[in-house]
Image (spheres, rainbow, N blue to C red):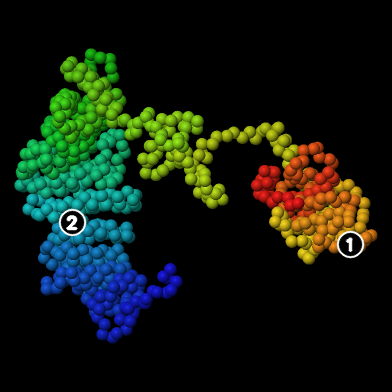
Amino acid sequence: MFWKFDLHTTSHIDTLLEKEDVTLTEVMDEEDVLQECKAQNRKLVDFLVRPQSMEDLVTYITQEPSEDMDEKLKYKYPNISCELLTSDVGQINDRLGEDEGLLMKLYSFLQNEPPLNPLLASFFSKVLSILISRKPDQIVEFLRKREDFVDLMIKHIGTSAIMDLLLRMLTCIEPQQLRQDVLNWLNQEKIIQRLVDMVQPSQDEDRHSNASQSLCEIIRLSRDQMFQVQGGSEPDPLLATLEKQETVEKLLSNIFDKEKNESAIVSVIQILLTLFETRRPAFEGHLDICPPGMNHPSFSVNQSVLEAVKLRLKHFHQLLLEPPKKNVMKTTWGVLDPPVGNTRLNVVRLVASLLQTNTHVINLELIDLNTVGVILDMYFKYIWNNFLHIQVEICTAMILAMPPALNGPAEINQDSDQEPVRENHLVKHLFQKCQLIQRILDAWASNEKEQAEGGRRRGYMGHLTRIANAIVQNSDKGPNSALIQQLISELPEDVRERWEAFTSGPLADTNKKNTVDLVNTHHIHSSSDDEVDFKDNGFHQDSSLQQAFSDYQMQQMTSNFIEQFGFNDEEFADQDDVVDIPFDRISDINFSLNTNDSANIALFEACCKEKIQQFEDAGSDEDDIWDEKDVTFAPEAQRRPRSSGSTDSEESTDSEEEDVKRDPFEPSNSAPDERMEVDPGEAPTWTANFDDVPMDTGSSTPDGWESSPSGAKETGWADFSNFSAVTRSVALVTLSCGPLAGSDPWPVDEPPGSTEEEPPTDRITETVTNGSMKETVSLTVDAKTETAHLVLVSPRCTDTPHAARKCCSSKPTS
């Protein structure tokens, strides 16, 4: 890799700063100046915090660049200056925040006439924001001494960067007491009233939008802060001023007592919608149609706001009928004259928010104005405006599902013994005056007729289906179920029959289509030869495939998918490498443990005693099982070269215990190479040349073997001279598995052609150990075939003959 060769070059800035006449522009022309500054290069930081350098940096971001400069380089130095000042270096923050002269030069940017340069305004706002965050005490004290600060902020509120700076002052000041002091100071400066005055037709759209957004953010931030710091904080003075009835009335008078201006109307409605928010939306565009009676709002709507809005409901209703003048809009399907417009759409949103408050006086005012009826007229007129359709659906869903207003009277039917039904005026208005069921049936029939003639399906049909379903659901259960059933029963007979046929026919069919499976599992046929038989696996085919497809659609794959569909890759991995096997099904394992089962306890204790006793018996021998004993191999010089079929003996081991079953042999003269050395100790240990074990055959001696003189005998040596040697064959099998010492080893394969019953064989078995390793050497002599088999049994192989044959593939060598 390149870093191995130390190719990193040192910064040229250090060399540049060693010049006595270096200028700020030369430093800012370096490509890595920002990186070196953020890395707090000592020489660079010392250069930047010089008084002249700091003054030049502030000048770059507060003064308009020369007009004759190249457009590509015009804002190069202002941009770099802003980045250097906001690099969050402690020395730079200290010098800028504690030097009042630099702060006055920075503050002078606000004293320019509007409109401000938006790019320079963003630089100014960014620098002052980081100073507010890092030096709150000094900056707040400095700004409070400027009597025209709030006036200048309101003056330039049309610039988005200035609006952001205002909101920074409400969010970036960390000490709670200092933040409360700032709120009180801004409230004393009547910043709320000044922002309200910006939302009127005489101002431009930028001031409308930014002032409205500032007020909305103040409401949200104040409510969030109120719930984050509960009990110990003072009430937010800005929020309290905004929720006053006179403040709301001032807002409404700005749009209704003067000429109609769509921008001002929409901005005021945005503020009212924020005041009516019972909780913050989860994300932008989120719509919660759950009525207030069925949820737990985080914030309560101030009654003074409702009172102020109630007095202006007739003006909002008039906006639905006579919106601000809009030009005719041509669309792909026709002409809109007039179009819905942003004003009427926001008025419908305001009506939905008012219905959510479920205030009795508001509900009665809407009923008197027939506002819900006008909204339904717009719904069926503008068949392609889904923004309008969703708001109308929200309104109808809340009317059907929310309980009657608390101060609404209960209606008692004198001719029946039923319990009194609480009056819900909006529900009665929806069914009687607005004729919701009749309009649903007519719109559905009209749409089917158009589709039968080759026309398009109307754009509101999906929302209309959900409205019809809401009626059916709330008639079955809910706070208004009895009233809805009563109102349906009071419908004309033909309408009631049509409704019943509609709910059991077209509506039920549409719901069935909307809930159909995404894949038809009844006709899935596999073209693969590896088709999985789910029935054999204990899973129903339809349910398994459907569940697998559902899991496949999920964003995060679940363990259920792996268990029921396909194979798990971990099944083919080495279990030693699988360290993240999930334990998702452990919680599903059910078992019972009976701790009072005396039979099991007795069995367990008996097994423990038996195992422990065997170990104690094995350790009670005179020899220590852990003692190491040597096995001496025949000298290398006495060995013949290995034949091609022989295998290597792995290692020699010491003896643990002996279990020798052998027939006595008569001593005779034998050659030294024909002897197997035996330890003359109490537990003899065999030492053998595992490559070739020579046998005494009388007069015949293999080439290269030396015979010992006749009559030469030594004690401690095994003598095989009694066997007549016709054929000498030694079979050596190494590393084969067999039984423990003292028992018969695994049989060696029978020589080919042997079909007769084998005569008794002579066997000499000896066990040698080395620590925890144990090997058994067995020498078997077949009297018929005159063949000697030497077997070395090693515990390193597995415990089965099959595994031994698989692991130890050495074959006997004759």
Task: Please indicate whether residue 798 sits to the left or right of residue 539 in the image.
Answer: right
Task: Please indicate whether residue 604 sits to the left or right of residue 657 in the image.
Answer: left
Would you identify the image quadrant in which residue 29 lies? Answer: bottom left
Count of numbered tags: 2
* Residue marked by disc 2: 191
Would you identify the image quadrant in which residue 21 lies? Answer: bottom left
Say whether disc 1 or disc 2 marks the residue closer to the N-terminus.
2
Residue at left offset 18%, top offset 15%: 493
Residue reaching furthest right? 711
- For this rendering, which residue is in front, 261 or 740? 740
Residue at left offset 25%, top offset 21%: 505
| 470, above or below 711, in the image | above
| 665, above or below 402, in the image | below
SS for tag 1? loop
- For this rendering, which residue is in front, 772 or 396? 772
Camera-side mark, 1 or 2: 1
**Residue 90, can we see it?**
no
Q: Residues within 10 Å of mark 1 (few under 14, many from 20)?
A: some
**Residue 469, can we see it?**
yes
SS for tag 2? helix
Instruction: Residue 708: give its label.
Output: 1
**How far apart, in angstroms, are the residues tagged by discs 1 and 2?**
123 Å
Residue at left offset 28%, top offset 71%: 84
Mark 2 is on which residue type? Ile
Would you identify the image quadrant in which residue 627 lies? Answer: bottom right
